[in-house]
Image: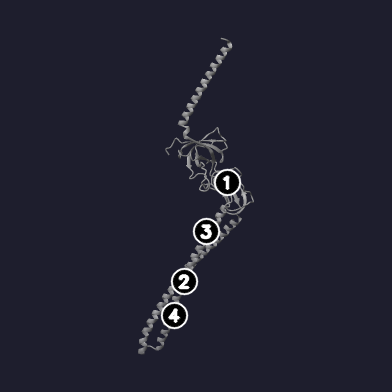
Amino acid sequence: MEPDAENGEENRARTRVFVFIFLGLLVLGGVYGLFHYLTYGRYVESTNDAYLRADIIEVAPKLPGYVEQVLVADNQAVKAGDPLVRISGIDTASQAAQLTAELAAAQAMVAQSISRVYSQDAAILAARADEMDARSRVDYLQGEVKRYEPLTRSGAESGEKLAQLRQQRDGAQAGLARAGAQAVLAAQQRDAAAAEVDGAHARVAAIRAQQQRANSDVALSVLRSSINGRIGDSGVRVGQYVRPGQRLMSVVPVEHIYVVANFKETQVRRMRIGQKVDIVLDALADEPLKGRVESFSPGTGSVFALLPPQNATGNFTKIVQRVPVRIKLDGAMPAGRVIVPGMSVVASVDTRDNKN
C-alpha cells in the first residue's frame, strides 16, 4: 500500500475516533442535562425581572419654617435618633416661654382662689355662730316678755318694763334675720370661690396643654432619623423655606435590603413561603446570595398600576401577568461591596419544597 493511502486511512480512523468520542460526550451531556432537568431544573423558577428594594423613609417637617442647619451630608450613615435638619424655631420657643409664665400666673390664681374658699369657710362659721347667738338672745327675750306680761296685767310690774323687753326682743329678731342673711351670703360667696377654683384649674390645664404643644413644636424643629441607614436624595439647603409634609431627604436602611422578583403568573403555581432562592446580582455575578420566599403580593402589578387595565372594553388580548414576590436575604451582605436598592438581580426559586 502506498504511503499516501496509509496516511489517509489513519486520518479517517482518527476522525472516526474523534467523532465517536464527541458523540459519546454529547450523549453523556444530554443524559446529564436530562437528569439535571428531571431532578432539579424543572422545579426551579427564574426571572431577571427582579430588583433590590428597601423600606425607604422620607424625612419631612411637621412645621413650616426656614432651614437653619443641615446636620448631615449626602450618603452619610446615620443612626436612629440622630439629628438631620434644624428648622428655625424662634417663634415656637418664645411662645413656649410665654406659656410658661402664663402657667405660673394661673397656678398663683388657683392658690388665691383656694385661699378665698378657706376664708369663706371661716366666714360661714362666724356667721353661723352669730346666728346662734342671735337666736339664743331672741329666745331669752321672748321668755322675758312672756314672764312680764302676767306681772304687768296684775300690776306687779310697770308697763314700761314690758314695752322695753318687747323692743329688745324685736331688735334681737332683726339681728337674727341679719345673721341668717350673712350666713346665706357667706355660703354663696364660698360657692363662687369654689367655682373660681374650678375655673382656675381649667385654665391651668388649658395652658399646660398649650405649653406641651409648644414644647413639642420646639422639639419638632429638629428633624431626627427614625431608623438606621444612609442619607439619600437630599435636596434641602440652609435658608430654604419648607412646608409641612415637604420631602427634604430620604433615609435608606441599607442593612435591611430585600428582593422583589416579578414572576409570571404561570411560575408561581408551586411557589410557597419559605422556599430557598438563589440570587445573582448583575453587579456581583461572582458572589451569589441566598434567600427565602417571604411573601406574595396580594395582587399582580397591573392591579396597583396608576391606570389599571380595563379588559371589559374593546378588543381583548391576553397578556401574562406578573406577581411580585418578596424575598428575604439570608446572612450578611458581602463586606466592602456596593449593594444598594434598585440593583438588578436574577432570582431562582427552588420549588421542590412544597411542605409550607
- Precedes in sequence: disc 4 or disc 3: 4
Disc 4 from disc 3: Cα separation: 52 Å
Residue 301 sits above or below residue 11 on the image = below
Residue 209, disc: 3
Q: Name the residue under label 1.
A: 250
- Precedes in sequence: disc 4 or disc 2: 4
- Badge 2 element: helix
Image depth: mark 4 or mark 2 in front: 2
Task: Measuring from the top left, give residue 81's x and y in whole percent.
Answer: 55, 47
- Precedes in sequence: disc 2 or disc 3: 2
- Precedes in sequence: disc 3 or disc 1: 3
Q: Are marks 4 and 3 in contact (CB under 8 Å)?
A: no
Task: Measuring from the top left, give residue 105's x and y in whole percent.
Answer: 54, 62
Residue 43 sits above or below residue 190 on the image = above
Q: Name the residue under label 4.
A: 174
Task: Measuring from the top left, give residue 95's x and y in whole percent.
Answer: 58, 58
354 displayed left or right of 283: left
